[in-house]
Image (cartoon, grey):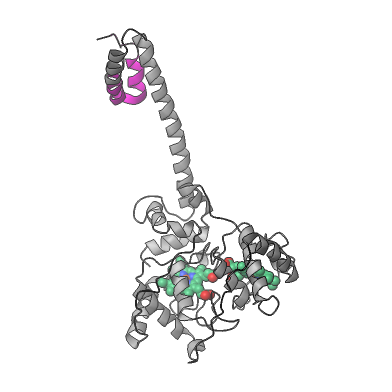
Amino acid sequence: MSDNTNCKPVCRTFMGGMVSKAGESWHFLVSGAISGRIPEIKMRCIVNFWQRAFLFVFLIIASVTSCYVYAQGMGDGMGMMGRGGVMDAMSQNQAFFDGKTLPIDLATPRPPESVASIAAGSKIFKERCAVCHGEKGDGKGEKAKDLVVKPWDFTFGWFKWRSTGSGEAPTDEDIFKTVSRGLHGTAMLPRSDLTTGQKWQVVYYLKTLSDFFEDEEKPKVVAVPSPTKSVEEYVAMGSKAYKKAKCYECHGHEGYGDGEKMDKLKDDWRRPILPTNFREQILKRGLNIEEIYLSIATGLNGTPMLSYSHILNDDEILAVSYYIRSISKKPSRWGMLGRMMNMTRDERTGMMIIMDGR
Ligand code: HEC
Ligand code: HEC
């Protein structure tokens, strides 16, 4: 065979013996097949050039990606790999972090709302929820101080995410939905670590934390109308309804959450609260039209976001829901990296807390 000593030292120093070996066999095959047409030494060097170029580009991409991911993790004192690594949890809740509205399991028969179920729910709450929501459910858990959006206080009886009228208690399904789907951008992640039965048990327990649920009469569920116009028509109509109902006073003319009242708002606990910045945050309740409709039609109890059912008619609320969705931030199209860049600090903190087994 030929004299290939010319390229060997370069290969050895750059990629080590393995590549040199691979180079040798490659060289043997290629030079055998096309012998005489391309000078051997030139051929080997071309191979090495492409090998080096590929390795160089690969190393740059790999280091930039891992530096970014590592730095993101460091903020909350965690790493990317190891016990409960970020990658591990990311794959579990991928759809949620993609901004999607997760399906909920209403098909599996639910456990009875009995003393035993409530006791089981209490145990789940103490082990898996109290770290944020507090032992008494008053929102004063040990991790609450680390969160931008504070955990909810269940002792008051108010629930924001409902399908029932303003000031009403939620249905069991509403609470079940929140626990199953999570709230985007906050530490309240979908609890895929609980079985359907466990979710119902914890729902039953939450209802014992205030006297709001003592009323035997079930609250009426607000029906979401079916669309009768095209999406474009609704978006155009919704933009007008947004002005008519003065949503801009809080959410801003362009939807950046910078309306004139933005820094004057307080929730029912007298804590400052900001209106949603539609353009730059994924809606807590997700981008599903039905969910957006319910927020606007029923209002978010305990916050300055009131029900608009007396100001706008059903079709206008549907229209403004399409408009809000059209201007709302969309999930990233950049796969895993995009998902990581879009994750809020609260979501990362929430993920770490859940992975700690609480
Ligand atoms: C890592 C912190 C954290 C943990 C753990 C946690 N939550 Fe939450 N939860 C939050 C935050 C923050 C909110 C408020 C989000 C918002 O609506 O602004 C919230 C809101 C909620 C709501 C919505 C109430 C409403 O206004 O409608 C429900 C229901 C809820 N949590 C149930 C649970 C249950 C049940 C568990 C345990 C299985 C749990 N949470 C565990 C942080 C947490
Ligand atoms: C007085 C101020 C105020 C006005 C006016 C107002 N909102 Fe809000 N809105 C808020 C606040 C504050 C929140 C944030 C609640 C939270 O995240 O806890 C909010 C939240 C929302 C959400 C978010 C739900 C989510 O999933 O994150 C939607 C949708 C919404 N508003 C739509 C509207 C529309 C449409 C109008 C007009 C018809 C309107 N709002 C008028 C204060 C206001």
- Report the span colored magenta: 1-24
Image vertical order of residue 150 relative to residue 8, above or below:
below
Q: How many marks?
A: 0
Residue at (42%, 63%) from the top-left corner?
Answer: 353
Of 67 and 261, the residue lying toward us:
261
Q: Which quarter shows the C terminus? A: bottom left
Left or right: 1 in relation to 168: left
Residue at (39%, 57%) from the top-left corner?
Answer: 89
Residue at (51%, 55%) from the top-left corner?
Answer: 343
Image vertical order of residue 257 relative to residue 342, above or below:
below
- The image position of residue 141, as x and y in percent, is 46, 72
Is residue 305 visible in the rendered structure shown here?
no
Q: Which quarter shows the N terminus? A: top left
The image quadrant that residue 256 belongs to is bottom right
Left or right: 261 in relation to 159: right
Of 287 and 70, the residue lying toward us:
287
- The image position of residue 100, as x and y in percent, is 49, 60
Of 233 and 223, the residue lying toward us:
233
Image vertical order of residue 85 relative to residue 181, above or below:
above
- The image position of residue 277, as x and y in percent, is 64, 61
Asked if the magenta segment contains residue 349, the reply would be no
The image quadrant that residue 327 belongs to is bottom right
- The image position of residue 121, as x and y in percent, is 37, 79
Asked if the magenta segment contains residue 2, the reply would be yes
Is residue 112 visible in the rendered structure shown here?
yes
Image vertical order of residue 110 relative to residue 46, above or below:
below
Residue at far front of view: 228
The prevailing secondary structure element of the residues shown in magenta is: helix
Residue at far left of view: 1
